[in-house]
Image (tube, grey):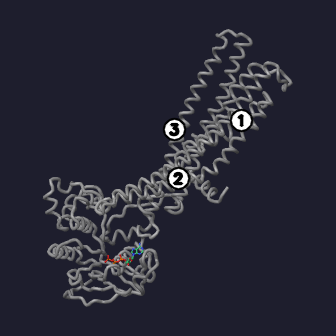
Amino acid sequence: MSQEDRHAGKMLARLQRHGGLALWLALLAPLCGGGLLAWQAWTLAEVLGRAIEERAAPGLLLPSITLIFCLLLVRAGLGAIGEMAGIAGAEAIKRQLRQALFSQLLARSPRDADAAPSGVAAAAIVDQVEALDGYFARYLPAMVQAGLLPLIFGAMILPLDWVAGVLFLITAPLIPLFMALVGWGAQIATDRQAQALSRLSGRFSDRLRGILTLKLFGREAAETEDIVAASEALRQRTLKVLRIAFLSSAVLEFFAALGVAGIALYVGLTFIDYLHLRSTPLTLEAGMFLLLMAPEVYNPLRLLASHYHDRAVAKAGLAEIERQLGALPRAAFVLEDVAPRPGPAIAVSLTNVTLRTPDRMRAVLKGASLAVAPGEHVAILGPSGSGKTTLLETLAGLREMDGGITLDGVRLNQWSDGDLRARVFVLTQKPRLIHASLRDNVALARPDATIGEIDGAVERAALDGLVHALPQGLETLIGEDGVGLSGGQAQRLALARLFLRDPGLILLDEPTAHLDAALETDIIDRLLDYAEGRTLIVATHSARIAMRMDRAYRIAAGALFDVPARRPSRSVA
Ligand SMILES: Nc1ncnc2c1ncn2[C@@H]1O[C@H](COP(=O)(O)OP(=O)(O)OP(=O)(O)O)[C@@H](O)[C@H]1O
Protein backbone atom coordinates (compact mmCIF):
# COMPACT_ATOMS: atom_id res chain seq x y z
CA MET A 1 0.00 0.00 0.00
CA SER A 2 1.55 3.30 -1.06
CA GLN A 3 1.88 6.30 1.24
CA GLU A 4 -0.79 8.24 -0.71
CA ASP A 5 -3.10 5.26 -0.39
CA ARG A 6 -2.61 5.18 3.36
CA HIS A 7 -3.13 8.93 3.58
CA ALA A 8 -6.35 8.76 1.55
CA GLY A 9 -7.52 5.88 3.75
CA LYS A 10 -6.86 7.98 6.86
CA MET A 11 -8.73 10.95 5.39
CA LEU A 12 -11.73 8.76 4.52
CA ALA A 13 -11.75 7.32 8.05
CA ARG A 14 -11.67 10.86 9.46
CA LEU A 15 -14.56 11.96 7.26
CA GLN A 16 -16.51 8.83 8.20
CA ARG A 17 -17.07 10.27 11.69
CA HIS A 18 -19.32 12.96 10.26
CA GLY A 19 -21.71 10.29 8.95
CA GLY A 20 -23.12 9.95 12.49
CA LEU A 21 -25.89 7.57 13.44
CA ALA A 22 -27.13 7.28 9.85
CA LEU A 23 -23.85 5.73 8.69
CA TRP A 24 -23.84 3.26 11.59
CA LEU A 25 -27.38 2.27 10.67
CA ALA A 26 -26.30 1.81 7.05
CA LEU A 27 -23.54 -0.55 8.24
CA LEU A 28 -25.65 -2.50 10.75
CA ALA A 29 -28.92 -2.90 8.81
CA PRO A 30 -27.44 -5.24 6.12
CA LEU A 31 -25.76 -7.36 8.85
CA CYS A 32 -29.11 -7.85 10.58
CA GLY A 33 -30.60 -8.54 7.14
CA GLY A 34 -27.91 -11.21 6.62
CA GLY A 35 -28.79 -12.92 9.94
CA LEU A 36 -32.47 -12.94 8.97
CA LEU A 37 -31.56 -14.33 5.55
CA ALA A 38 -29.91 -17.39 7.12
CA TRP A 39 -32.99 -17.87 9.31
CA GLN A 40 -35.23 -17.55 6.26
CA ALA A 41 -33.16 -20.03 4.23
CA TRP A 42 -33.17 -22.53 7.08
CA THR A 43 -36.97 -22.22 7.50
CA LEU A 44 -37.50 -22.62 3.75
CA ALA A 45 -35.23 -25.67 3.66
CA GLU A 46 -37.12 -27.10 6.63
CA VAL A 47 -40.51 -26.49 4.93
CA LEU A 48 -39.31 -28.13 1.71
CA GLY A 49 -37.74 -31.03 3.61
CA ARG A 50 -40.91 -31.66 5.60
CA ALA A 51 -43.15 -31.24 2.58
CA ILE A 52 -41.11 -33.58 0.38
CA GLU A 53 -39.63 -36.10 2.82
CA GLU A 54 -42.33 -36.25 5.49
CA ARG A 55 -45.25 -35.21 3.20
CA ALA A 56 -46.46 -32.87 5.96
CA ALA A 57 -49.97 -31.39 5.52
CA PRO A 58 -50.02 -27.78 4.22
CA GLY A 59 -51.79 -26.65 7.42
CA LEU A 60 -48.83 -27.81 9.51
CA LEU A 61 -46.43 -25.89 7.30
CA LEU A 62 -48.46 -22.68 7.37
CA PRO A 63 -46.75 -21.10 10.44
CA SER A 64 -43.32 -21.64 8.86
CA ILE A 65 -44.49 -20.24 5.51
CA THR A 66 -45.92 -17.20 7.31
CA LEU A 67 -42.60 -16.78 9.09
CA ILE A 68 -40.78 -16.86 5.73
CA PHE A 69 -43.01 -14.07 4.38
CA CYS A 70 -42.54 -12.02 7.55
CA LEU A 71 -38.77 -12.46 7.33
CA LEU A 72 -38.90 -11.43 3.67
CA LEU A 73 -40.81 -8.26 4.57
CA VAL A 74 -38.52 -7.38 7.48
CA ARG A 75 -35.45 -7.95 5.26
CA ALA A 76 -36.90 -5.71 2.55
CA GLY A 77 -37.59 -3.05 5.21
CA LEU A 78 -34.05 -3.38 6.60
CA GLY A 79 -32.66 -3.11 3.06
CA ALA A 80 -34.59 0.09 2.43
CA ILE A 81 -33.61 1.55 5.82
CA GLY A 82 -29.95 0.66 5.23
CA GLU A 83 -29.96 2.25 1.78
CA MET A 84 -31.66 5.44 2.97
CA ALA A 85 -29.36 5.65 5.99
CA GLY A 86 -26.34 5.23 3.69
CA ILE A 87 -27.52 8.09 1.50
CA ALA A 88 -28.25 10.27 4.56
CA GLY A 89 -24.82 9.49 6.07
CA ALA A 90 -23.01 10.24 2.80
CA GLU A 91 -24.96 13.50 2.40
CA ALA A 92 -24.00 14.55 5.95
CA ILE A 93 -20.33 13.86 5.22
CA LYS A 94 -20.40 15.72 1.90
CA ARG A 95 -22.24 18.67 3.45
CA GLN A 96 -19.69 18.93 6.25
CA LEU A 97 -16.74 18.65 3.85
CA ARG A 98 -18.16 21.22 1.45
CA GLN A 99 -18.78 23.61 4.33
CA ALA A 100 -15.24 23.07 5.65
CA LEU A 101 -13.64 23.52 2.23
CA PHE A 102 -15.66 26.61 1.38
CA SER A 103 -14.96 28.21 4.75
CA GLN A 104 -11.25 27.38 4.32
CA LEU A 105 -11.36 29.05 0.91
CA LEU A 106 -12.98 32.14 2.43
CA ALA A 107 -10.58 32.22 5.37
CA ARG A 108 -7.57 32.42 3.05
CA SER A 109 -6.59 35.63 1.33
CA PRO A 110 -8.19 35.77 -2.12
CA ARG A 111 -4.85 37.25 -3.25
CA ASP A 112 -2.86 34.09 -2.43
CA ALA A 113 -0.57 33.41 -5.35
CA ASP A 114 -1.29 29.69 -5.14
CA ALA A 115 -5.07 30.08 -4.90
CA ALA A 116 -6.78 27.61 -7.24
CA PRO A 117 -8.51 29.10 -10.30
CA SER A 118 -12.21 29.54 -9.52
CA GLY A 119 -13.36 26.87 -12.01
CA VAL A 120 -11.00 24.30 -10.49
CA ALA A 121 -12.03 25.26 -6.93
CA ALA A 122 -15.69 24.92 -7.91
CA ALA A 123 -15.00 21.51 -9.50
CA ALA A 124 -13.19 20.38 -6.32
CA ILE A 125 -15.94 21.50 -3.96
CA VAL A 126 -18.85 20.34 -6.13
CA ASP A 127 -17.73 17.43 -8.32
CA GLN A 128 -14.83 15.90 -6.39
CA VAL A 129 -16.74 16.00 -3.09
CA GLU A 130 -19.65 14.33 -4.90
CA ALA A 131 -17.22 11.55 -5.82
CA LEU A 132 -17.22 10.51 -2.14
CA ASP A 133 -20.91 9.64 -2.31
CA GLY A 134 -20.51 6.09 -3.59
CA TYR A 135 -17.80 5.28 -1.04
CA PHE A 136 -19.88 6.13 2.02
CA ALA A 137 -23.37 5.29 0.73
CA ARG A 138 -22.51 1.99 -0.99
CA TYR A 139 -18.91 0.84 -0.69
CA LEU A 140 -18.58 0.99 3.11
CA PRO A 141 -21.79 -0.97 3.84
CA ALA A 142 -20.79 -3.46 1.12
CA MET A 143 -17.32 -3.80 2.64
CA VAL A 144 -18.67 -4.52 6.12
CA GLN A 145 -21.08 -7.10 4.67
CA ALA A 146 -18.35 -8.70 2.58
CA GLY A 147 -16.00 -8.82 5.56
CA LEU A 148 -18.44 -10.41 7.99
CA LEU A 149 -21.33 -12.20 6.28
CA PRO A 150 -19.36 -14.86 4.33
CA LEU A 151 -17.48 -15.70 7.56
CA ILE A 152 -20.70 -15.87 9.57
CA PHE A 153 -22.41 -17.98 6.88
CA GLY A 154 -19.33 -20.18 6.57
CA ALA A 155 -19.23 -20.71 10.35
CA MET A 156 -22.95 -21.66 10.30
CA ILE A 157 -22.46 -24.12 7.46
CA LEU A 158 -19.24 -25.73 8.79
CA PRO A 159 -20.87 -27.78 11.62
CA LEU A 160 -23.66 -28.78 9.22
CA ASP A 161 -21.35 -29.96 6.44
CA TRP A 162 -17.59 -29.63 6.74
CA VAL A 163 -16.96 -30.03 3.00
CA ALA A 164 -19.26 -27.17 2.01
CA GLY A 165 -17.98 -25.05 4.93
CA VAL A 166 -14.33 -25.52 3.93
CA LEU A 167 -15.19 -24.85 0.25
CA PHE A 168 -16.83 -21.56 1.19
CA LEU A 169 -14.07 -20.53 3.57
CA ILE A 170 -11.39 -21.21 0.94
CA THR A 171 -13.05 -19.73 -2.15
CA ALA A 172 -14.58 -16.63 -0.57
CA PRO A 173 -11.28 -14.91 0.40
CA LEU A 174 -9.90 -15.55 -3.11
CA ILE A 175 -12.38 -13.03 -4.49
CA PRO A 176 -11.21 -9.95 -2.54
CA LEU A 177 -7.62 -11.01 -3.25
CA PHE A 178 -8.13 -10.92 -7.02
CA MET A 179 -10.17 -7.75 -6.74
CA ALA A 180 -7.36 -6.01 -4.88
CA LEU A 181 -4.96 -7.02 -7.66
CA VAL A 182 -7.27 -5.54 -10.29
CA GLY A 183 -7.90 -2.54 -8.00
CA TRP A 184 -4.27 -1.35 -8.14
CA GLY A 185 -4.67 -0.56 -11.81
CA ALA A 186 -8.08 0.96 -11.15
CA GLN A 187 -6.66 3.53 -8.71
CA ILE A 188 -4.19 4.92 -11.23
CA ALA A 189 -6.86 5.13 -13.94
CA THR A 190 -9.32 6.78 -11.54
CA ASP A 191 -6.72 9.35 -10.38
CA ARG A 192 -6.17 10.31 -14.01
CA GLN A 193 -9.91 10.55 -14.59
CA ALA A 194 -10.32 12.91 -11.58
CA GLN A 195 -7.53 15.13 -12.93
CA ALA A 196 -9.13 15.19 -16.38
CA LEU A 197 -12.45 16.22 -14.81
CA SER A 198 -10.78 19.08 -12.90
CA ARG A 199 -9.02 20.23 -16.04
CA LEU A 200 -12.23 20.24 -18.06
CA SER A 201 -14.22 22.07 -15.34
CA GLY A 202 -11.51 24.69 -14.82
CA ARG A 203 -11.08 25.28 -18.52
CA PHE A 204 -14.81 25.44 -19.16
CA SER A 205 -15.62 27.98 -16.45
CA ASP A 206 -12.57 30.08 -17.36
CA ARG A 207 -13.57 30.23 -21.03
CA LEU A 208 -17.18 30.95 -20.07
CA ARG A 209 -16.06 34.02 -18.15
CA GLY A 210 -13.98 35.21 -21.07
CA ILE A 211 -16.58 34.40 -23.71
CA LEU A 212 -16.85 38.01 -24.93
CA THR A 213 -13.10 38.32 -25.44
CA LEU A 214 -12.98 34.98 -27.26
CA LYS A 215 -15.80 36.08 -29.57
CA LEU A 216 -14.16 39.43 -30.27
CA PHE A 217 -10.97 37.70 -31.34
CA GLY A 218 -12.87 35.12 -33.37
CA ARG A 219 -11.51 32.25 -31.26
CA GLU A 220 -14.80 30.37 -30.98
CA ALA A 221 -13.75 27.43 -33.16
CA ALA A 222 -10.31 26.97 -31.56
CA GLU A 223 -11.63 27.23 -28.02
CA THR A 224 -14.54 24.89 -28.78
CA GLU A 225 -12.01 22.42 -30.15
CA ASP A 226 -9.99 22.71 -26.94
CA ILE A 227 -13.06 22.04 -24.82
CA VAL A 228 -13.98 19.09 -27.06
CA ALA A 229 -10.41 17.76 -26.70
CA ALA A 230 -10.58 18.10 -22.90
CA SER A 231 -13.93 16.29 -22.79
CA GLU A 232 -12.57 13.60 -25.15
CA ALA A 233 -9.67 13.08 -22.72
CA LEU A 234 -12.18 12.74 -19.91
CA ARG A 235 -14.25 10.28 -21.97
CA GLN A 236 -11.23 8.09 -22.68
CA ARG A 237 -10.14 8.10 -19.05
CA THR A 238 -13.67 7.34 -17.87
CA LEU A 239 -13.85 4.40 -20.27
CA LYS A 240 -10.54 3.09 -18.94
CA VAL A 241 -11.93 3.22 -15.41
CA LEU A 242 -15.10 1.45 -16.53
CA ARG A 243 -13.11 -1.24 -18.33
CA ILE A 244 -11.23 -2.01 -15.12
CA ALA A 245 -14.46 -1.90 -13.10
CA PHE A 246 -16.08 -4.40 -15.50
CA LEU A 247 -13.00 -6.58 -15.40
CA SER A 248 -13.03 -6.74 -11.59
CA SER A 249 -16.75 -7.61 -11.65
CA ALA A 250 -16.12 -10.34 -14.22
CA VAL A 251 -13.30 -11.84 -12.10
CA LEU A 252 -15.60 -11.96 -9.14
CA GLU A 253 -18.59 -13.35 -11.01
CA PHE A 254 -16.35 -16.11 -12.31
CA PHE A 255 -15.18 -17.18 -8.86
CA ALA A 256 -18.67 -16.83 -7.36
CA ALA A 257 -20.18 -18.95 -10.13
CA LEU A 258 -17.42 -21.53 -9.65
CA GLY A 259 -18.14 -21.68 -5.89
CA VAL A 260 -21.91 -22.06 -6.34
CA ALA A 261 -21.44 -24.70 -9.04
CA GLY A 262 -19.02 -26.58 -6.76
CA ILE A 263 -21.57 -26.70 -3.94
CA ALA A 264 -24.38 -27.75 -6.31
CA LEU A 265 -22.17 -30.50 -7.72
CA TYR A 266 -21.17 -31.68 -4.26
CA VAL A 267 -24.79 -31.77 -2.96
CA GLY A 268 -26.06 -33.46 -6.15
CA LEU A 269 -23.31 -36.11 -6.17
CA THR A 270 -23.78 -36.77 -2.45
CA PHE A 271 -27.55 -37.24 -2.95
CA ILE A 272 -27.12 -39.71 -5.79
CA ASP A 273 -24.62 -41.59 -3.64
CA TYR A 274 -21.66 -40.90 -5.88
CA LEU A 275 -19.65 -38.97 -3.30
CA HIS A 276 -19.09 -40.26 0.22
CA LEU A 277 -17.25 -37.48 2.00
CA ARG A 278 -19.67 -37.29 4.92
CA SER A 279 -19.82 -39.73 7.84
CA THR A 280 -23.62 -39.30 8.13
CA PRO A 281 -26.12 -39.08 5.24
CA LEU A 282 -26.96 -35.60 3.96
CA THR A 283 -30.57 -34.78 4.78
CA LEU A 284 -32.77 -33.05 2.20
CA GLU A 285 -33.19 -30.20 4.66
CA ALA A 286 -29.42 -29.68 5.06
CA GLY A 287 -28.84 -30.08 1.30
CA MET A 288 -31.51 -27.51 0.48
CA PHE A 289 -30.03 -25.13 3.07
CA LEU A 290 -26.59 -25.49 1.48
CA LEU A 291 -28.00 -24.84 -1.99
CA LEU A 292 -30.01 -21.84 -0.81
CA MET A 293 -27.05 -20.35 1.05
CA ALA A 294 -24.40 -20.97 -1.64
CA PRO A 295 -25.20 -17.84 -3.72
CA GLU A 296 -25.77 -15.84 -0.53
CA VAL A 297 -22.23 -16.53 0.70
CA TYR A 298 -20.86 -14.91 -2.45
CA ASN A 299 -23.50 -12.19 -2.73
CA PRO A 300 -21.87 -9.73 -0.28
CA LEU A 301 -18.61 -10.17 -2.21
CA ARG A 302 -20.35 -9.54 -5.52
CA LEU A 303 -21.91 -6.44 -4.04
CA LEU A 304 -18.48 -5.31 -2.88
CA ALA A 305 -17.06 -5.87 -6.34
CA SER A 306 -19.80 -3.84 -7.99
CA HIS A 307 -18.96 -0.92 -5.67
CA TYR A 308 -15.23 -1.53 -5.56
CA HIS A 309 -14.43 1.29 -7.95
CA ASP A 310 -16.37 3.73 -5.68
CA ARG A 311 -13.41 3.48 -3.32
CA ALA A 312 -10.92 4.34 -6.04
CA VAL A 313 -13.15 7.21 -7.19
CA ALA A 314 -13.35 8.60 -3.62
CA LYS A 315 -9.59 8.35 -3.11
CA ALA A 316 -8.93 10.06 -6.42
CA GLY A 317 -11.48 12.77 -5.54
CA LEU A 318 -9.78 13.43 -2.19
CA ALA A 319 -6.33 13.52 -3.78
CA GLU A 320 -7.56 16.02 -6.36
CA ILE A 321 -9.18 18.21 -3.68
CA GLU A 322 -5.91 18.25 -1.72
CA ARG A 323 -3.90 18.97 -4.88
CA GLN A 324 -6.09 21.95 -5.71
CA LEU A 325 -7.12 23.35 -2.32
CA GLY A 326 -4.41 22.10 0.07
CA ALA A 327 -4.77 19.78 3.06
CA LEU A 328 -8.33 18.96 4.05
CA PRO A 329 -9.51 21.12 6.94
CA ARG A 330 -10.33 19.19 10.13
CA ALA A 331 -13.53 21.18 10.68
CA ALA A 332 -15.38 24.06 9.12
CA PHE A 333 -13.93 27.44 10.08
CA VAL A 334 -16.29 29.48 12.17
CA LEU A 335 -17.33 32.32 9.91
CA GLU A 336 -19.31 35.31 10.99
CA ASP A 337 -20.67 38.09 8.86
CA VAL A 338 -18.97 41.32 9.83
CA ALA A 339 -21.15 44.37 10.31
CA PRO A 340 -19.57 47.78 9.73
CA ARG A 341 -18.53 49.47 12.97
CA PRO A 342 -18.54 53.25 13.15
CA GLY A 343 -15.56 54.83 14.91
CA PRO A 344 -12.94 57.50 14.68
CA ALA A 345 -10.51 57.94 11.76
CA ILE A 346 -7.62 55.46 11.74
CA ALA A 347 -3.93 56.43 11.77
CA VAL A 348 -1.74 54.47 9.32
CA SER A 349 1.99 53.97 9.69
CA LEU A 350 4.46 52.11 7.48
CA THR A 351 8.02 51.55 8.73
CA ASN A 352 10.63 50.06 6.44
CA VAL A 353 8.02 48.06 4.51
CA THR A 354 8.95 45.78 1.62
CA LEU A 355 6.20 44.50 -0.67
CA ARG A 356 6.60 41.71 -3.18
CA THR A 357 4.59 40.46 -6.11
CA PRO A 358 2.25 37.58 -5.12
CA ASP A 359 4.72 35.03 -6.49
CA ARG A 360 7.37 36.69 -4.21
CA MET A 361 9.77 36.82 -7.14
CA ARG A 362 10.16 40.59 -7.22
CA ALA A 363 9.98 43.46 -4.72
CA VAL A 364 7.70 46.29 -5.86
CA LEU A 365 8.41 48.48 -2.85
CA LYS A 366 11.60 48.35 -0.76
CA GLY A 367 12.03 49.77 2.73
CA ALA A 368 9.18 52.28 2.38
CA SER A 369 8.02 54.41 5.31
CA LEU A 370 4.89 56.54 5.53
CA ALA A 371 2.77 58.06 8.27
CA VAL A 372 -0.82 59.06 7.63
CA ALA A 373 -2.53 60.96 10.44
CA PRO A 374 -6.14 60.10 11.36
CA GLY A 375 -8.46 61.94 8.98
CA GLU A 376 -5.71 62.70 6.47
CA HIS A 377 -6.34 62.23 2.74
CA VAL A 378 -3.45 60.81 0.72
CA ALA A 379 -2.99 59.98 -2.97
CA ILE A 380 -0.63 57.25 -4.18
CA LEU A 381 0.58 57.90 -7.71
CA GLY A 382 2.87 55.89 -9.91
CA PRO A 383 3.17 54.31 -13.33
CA SER A 384 1.18 51.23 -14.19
CA GLY A 385 2.57 48.13 -12.48
CA SER A 386 4.57 50.17 -9.94
CA GLY A 387 2.77 48.65 -6.93
CA LYS A 388 -0.12 50.99 -5.98
CA THR A 389 -2.67 48.19 -5.82
CA THR A 390 -0.20 46.01 -3.94
CA LEU A 391 0.21 48.74 -1.31
CA LEU A 392 -3.55 49.26 -0.86
CA GLU A 393 -4.26 45.54 -0.68
CA THR A 394 -1.46 45.10 1.86
CA LEU A 395 -3.00 47.81 4.05
CA ALA A 396 -6.29 45.90 3.79
CA GLY A 397 -4.53 42.79 5.13
CA LEU A 398 -4.84 40.93 1.83
CA ARG A 399 -1.15 40.49 1.05
CA GLU A 400 1.99 39.45 2.88
CA MET A 401 4.76 41.97 3.57
CA ASP A 402 8.01 42.50 5.44
CA GLY A 403 8.42 45.39 7.84
CA GLY A 404 6.01 47.15 10.13
CA ILE A 405 2.53 48.40 9.32
CA THR A 406 0.32 49.66 12.11
CA LEU A 407 -3.26 50.89 12.06
CA ASP A 408 -4.04 53.06 15.06
CA GLY A 409 -0.74 51.93 16.59
CA VAL A 410 -1.70 48.23 16.45
CA ARG A 411 0.34 45.99 14.17
CA LEU A 412 -1.65 44.98 11.11
CA ASN A 413 -1.23 41.25 11.78
CA GLN A 414 -2.70 41.73 15.23
CA TRP A 415 -5.93 43.12 13.83
CA SER A 416 -8.51 40.37 13.62
CA ASP A 417 -10.00 39.88 10.19
CA GLY A 418 -13.40 40.90 11.60
CA ASP A 419 -12.11 44.17 13.07
CA LEU A 420 -10.28 45.00 9.87
CA ARG A 421 -13.37 44.45 7.71
CA ALA A 422 -15.59 46.36 10.16
CA ARG A 423 -13.38 49.45 10.20
CA VAL A 424 -11.62 49.48 6.80
CA PHE A 425 -13.32 49.86 3.41
CA VAL A 426 -11.55 48.78 0.23
CA LEU A 427 -12.72 49.54 -3.28
CA THR A 428 -10.67 47.34 -5.59
CA GLN A 429 -9.81 48.22 -9.16
CA LYS A 430 -12.25 45.67 -10.56
CA PRO A 431 -15.05 45.54 -8.00
CA ARG A 432 -17.23 42.49 -8.44
CA LEU A 433 -20.93 42.99 -9.05
CA ILE A 434 -23.12 39.96 -8.53
CA HIS A 435 -26.00 38.65 -10.61
CA ALA A 436 -28.77 40.27 -8.56
CA SER A 437 -30.77 43.50 -8.40
CA LEU A 438 -29.06 46.87 -8.16
CA ARG A 439 -30.44 47.13 -4.62
CA ASP A 440 -28.98 43.77 -3.57
CA ASN A 441 -25.64 44.74 -5.07
CA VAL A 442 -25.47 47.88 -2.93
CA ALA A 443 -26.96 46.19 0.16
CA LEU A 444 -24.13 43.63 0.05
CA ALA A 445 -22.15 46.21 2.05
CA ARG A 446 -24.76 46.22 4.83
CA PRO A 447 -27.67 43.78 4.44
CA ASP A 448 -29.62 45.40 7.29
CA ALA A 449 -29.57 48.84 5.63
CA THR A 450 -33.00 50.45 5.31
CA ILE A 451 -34.54 51.31 1.94
CA GLY A 452 -33.88 54.97 2.72
CA GLU A 453 -30.20 54.32 3.48
CA ILE A 454 -29.75 52.38 0.24
CA ASP A 455 -31.51 55.12 -1.73
CA GLY A 456 -29.24 57.66 -0.02
CA ALA A 457 -26.09 55.68 -0.92
CA VAL A 458 -27.22 55.37 -4.54
CA GLU A 459 -27.92 59.10 -4.72
CA ARG A 460 -24.55 59.88 -3.17
CA ALA A 461 -22.85 57.78 -5.86
CA ALA A 462 -24.62 59.95 -8.49
CA LEU A 463 -26.64 56.95 -9.72
CA ASP A 464 -30.12 58.28 -8.94
CA GLY A 465 -30.53 59.57 -12.53
CA LEU A 466 -29.84 56.08 -13.92
CA VAL A 467 -32.12 54.38 -11.40
CA HIS A 468 -35.04 56.74 -12.13
CA ALA A 469 -34.69 56.06 -15.86
CA LEU A 470 -35.04 52.28 -15.33
CA PRO A 471 -38.63 50.95 -15.32
CA GLN A 472 -37.86 48.67 -12.39
CA GLY A 473 -35.58 51.15 -10.63
CA LEU A 474 -33.35 49.61 -7.99
CA GLU A 475 -35.02 46.24 -8.51
CA THR A 476 -33.48 45.97 -12.00
CA LEU A 477 -31.42 42.80 -12.33
CA ILE A 478 -27.84 43.06 -13.54
CA GLY A 479 -25.59 40.29 -14.79
CA GLU A 480 -22.30 39.09 -13.39
CA ASP A 481 -19.56 41.68 -13.73
CA GLY A 482 -22.21 44.36 -14.01
CA VAL A 483 -23.46 43.40 -17.48
CA GLY A 484 -26.21 45.89 -18.30
CA LEU A 485 -24.25 48.79 -16.81
CA SER A 486 -21.55 50.98 -18.34
CA GLY A 487 -18.06 50.73 -16.83
CA GLY A 488 -18.54 54.03 -15.00
CA GLN A 489 -22.00 53.05 -13.71
CA ALA A 490 -20.67 49.72 -12.43
CA GLN A 491 -17.81 51.55 -10.69
CA ARG A 492 -20.22 53.98 -9.04
CA LEU A 493 -22.53 51.15 -7.97
CA ALA A 494 -19.56 49.59 -6.19
CA LEU A 495 -18.74 53.00 -4.71
CA ALA A 496 -22.31 53.28 -3.37
CA ARG A 497 -21.38 50.39 -1.04
CA LEU A 498 -18.89 52.72 0.67
CA PHE A 499 -21.66 55.07 1.73
CA LEU A 500 -23.33 52.28 3.74
CA ARG A 501 -20.19 51.26 5.66
CA ASP A 502 -19.05 54.15 7.91
CA PRO A 503 -15.34 53.11 7.96
CA GLY A 504 -12.39 54.79 9.73
CA LEU A 505 -10.02 54.02 6.84
CA ILE A 506 -11.04 54.18 3.18
CA LEU A 507 -8.78 52.58 0.55
CA LEU A 508 -9.79 53.33 -3.03
CA ASP A 509 -8.06 51.90 -6.11
CA GLU A 510 -8.69 54.06 -9.18
CA PRO A 511 -12.21 55.06 -8.09
CA THR A 512 -12.79 57.33 -11.10
CA ALA A 513 -11.04 55.29 -13.79
CA HIS A 514 -14.10 55.08 -16.05
CA LEU A 515 -15.52 58.59 -15.58
CA ASP A 516 -15.41 61.70 -17.77
CA ALA A 517 -13.79 64.83 -16.36
CA ALA A 518 -17.05 66.47 -15.21
CA LEU A 519 -18.31 63.33 -13.48
CA GLU A 520 -14.88 62.71 -11.99
CA THR A 521 -14.90 66.17 -10.36
CA ASP A 522 -18.43 65.58 -9.10
CA ILE A 523 -17.53 62.14 -7.63
CA ILE A 524 -14.34 63.51 -6.04
CA ASP A 525 -16.44 66.24 -4.37
CA ARG A 526 -18.87 63.65 -3.03
CA LEU A 527 -16.06 61.34 -1.92
CA LEU A 528 -14.16 64.07 -0.11
CA ASP A 529 -17.36 65.22 1.53
CA TYR A 530 -17.99 61.67 2.83
CA ALA A 531 -14.33 61.15 3.75
CA GLU A 532 -14.26 64.22 5.99
CA GLY A 533 -13.14 62.99 9.42
CA ARG A 534 -11.98 59.62 7.98
CA THR A 535 -8.58 58.53 6.72
CA LEU A 536 -8.52 58.19 2.94
CA ILE A 537 -5.83 56.63 0.75
CA VAL A 538 -6.44 56.65 -2.99
CA ALA A 539 -4.34 54.91 -5.64
CA THR A 540 -4.74 56.86 -8.84
CA HIS A 541 -3.27 58.02 -12.12
CA SER A 542 -5.47 61.12 -11.99
CA ALA A 543 -3.75 64.42 -11.25
CA ARG A 544 -7.21 65.88 -10.59
CA ILE A 545 -7.64 63.53 -7.62
CA ALA A 546 -4.07 63.95 -6.37
CA MET A 547 -4.34 67.74 -6.23
CA ARG A 548 -7.44 67.50 -4.05
CA MET A 549 -5.67 65.41 -1.38
CA ASP A 550 -3.73 66.63 1.66
CA ARG A 551 -0.63 64.82 0.49
CA ALA A 552 0.49 62.77 -2.45
CA TYR A 553 3.18 60.10 -2.82
CA ARG A 554 4.62 58.50 -5.89
CA ILE A 555 5.93 54.95 -6.21
CA ALA A 556 8.84 54.75 -8.60
CA ALA A 557 11.67 52.24 -8.90
CA GLY A 558 10.57 50.48 -5.73
CA ALA A 559 10.62 53.60 -3.55
CA LEU A 560 7.96 55.91 -2.16
CA PHE A 561 8.55 59.61 -2.89
CA ASP A 562 6.78 62.58 -1.37
CA VAL A 563 5.02 64.73 -4.01
CA PRO A 564 4.28 68.29 -2.90
CA ALA A 565 0.58 68.62 -2.04
CA ARG A 566 -1.38 71.27 -3.76
CA ARG A 567 -4.54 71.23 -1.73
CA PRO A 568 -4.83 74.22 0.58
CA SER A 569 -3.93 72.86 4.01
CA ARG A 570 -6.86 71.99 6.25
CA SER A 571 -6.93 70.95 9.83
CA VAL A 572 -6.76 67.21 10.37
CA ALA A 573 -7.66 65.52 13.66
N1 LIG B 1 -0.17 37.31 -9.39
C1 LIG B 1 0.96 37.98 -9.68
N2 LIG B 1 2.11 37.30 -9.86
C2 LIG B 1 3.26 37.96 -10.14
N3 LIG B 1 3.34 39.28 -10.27
C3 LIG B 1 2.24 40.01 -10.10
C4 LIG B 1 0.97 39.40 -9.80
N4 LIG B 1 0.04 40.37 -9.67
C5 LIG B 1 0.70 41.54 -9.89
N5 LIG B 1 2.00 41.32 -10.15
C6 LIG B 1 3.03 42.34 -10.41
O1 LIG B 1 3.06 43.20 -9.29
C7 LIG B 1 3.42 44.49 -9.72
C8 LIG B 1 2.58 45.52 -9.00
O2 LIG B 1 1.24 45.40 -9.46
P1 LIG B 1 0.12 46.42 -8.99
O3 LIG B 1 -1.18 45.88 -9.45
O4 LIG B 1 0.30 46.69 -7.55
O5 LIG B 1 0.49 47.74 -9.84
P2 LIG B 1 -0.32 49.09 -9.95
O6 LIG B 1 0.64 50.17 -9.65
O7 LIG B 1 -1.55 49.06 -9.14
O8 LIG B 1 -0.68 49.07 -11.47
P3 LIG B 1 -1.91 49.77 -12.26
O9 LIG B 1 -1.72 51.25 -12.16
O10 LIG B 1 -1.73 49.29 -13.65
O11 LIG B 1 -3.13 49.28 -11.60
C9 LIG B 1 3.23 44.54 -11.23
O12 LIG B 1 4.48 44.74 -11.84
C10 LIG B 1 2.65 43.21 -11.59
O13 LIG B 1 3.23 42.72 -12.76
User: Badge 3: few (under 14), some or many (20 or more) residues near its Cα, within 10 Å?
Assistant: some
**Which residue, given by chain and number where applicable, does mark 2 sit on?**
193
Mark number, residue 84: 3
Going by the numbered disc 3, the residue's amino acid type is Met
Q: Nearer the viewer, residue 239 or 393?
A: 239
* Above/below status of 403 relative to 168: below
The residue at the point 25 percent across, 59 percent down is 483
Please provide percent x and percent y for residue 52. 71, 13
Please give left or right for residue 525 compared with residue 481 in the image: left
Q: Secondary structure at mark 1?
A: helix
Q: Which quadrant holds residue 404?
A: bottom left
- How far separated are the C-alphas under marks 1 and 2? 37 Å
**Which residue, given by chain and number where applicable, does mark 1 sit on?**
152
Q: Nearer the viewer, residue 232 or 560?
A: 232
Q: Secondary structure at mark 3?
A: helix
* Above/below status of 208 relative to 300: below
Residue 344 seen: yes
Q: Quadrant of the N terminus?
A: bottom right
Q: Earlier in the sequence, mark 3 or mark 2?
A: 3
Going by the numbered disc 2, the residue's amino acid type is Gln
Q: Earlier in the sequence, mark 1 or mark 3?
A: 3
Please give left or right for residue 398 compared with residue 142 in the image: left
Please provide percent x and percent y for residue 26. 57, 40
From the image, state whether disc 3 or disc 2 is nearer to you.
2
Q: Earlier in the sequence, mark 1 or mark 2?
A: 1
Going by the numbered disc 1, the residue's amino acid type is Ile
Q: Quadrant of the C terminus?
A: bottom left
Please provide percent x and percent y for residue 531. 24, 76
From the image, state whether disc 1 or disc 2 is nearer to you.
2
- How far separated are the C-alphas under marks 3 and 2? 28 Å
The residue at the point 56 percent across, 54 percent down is 191
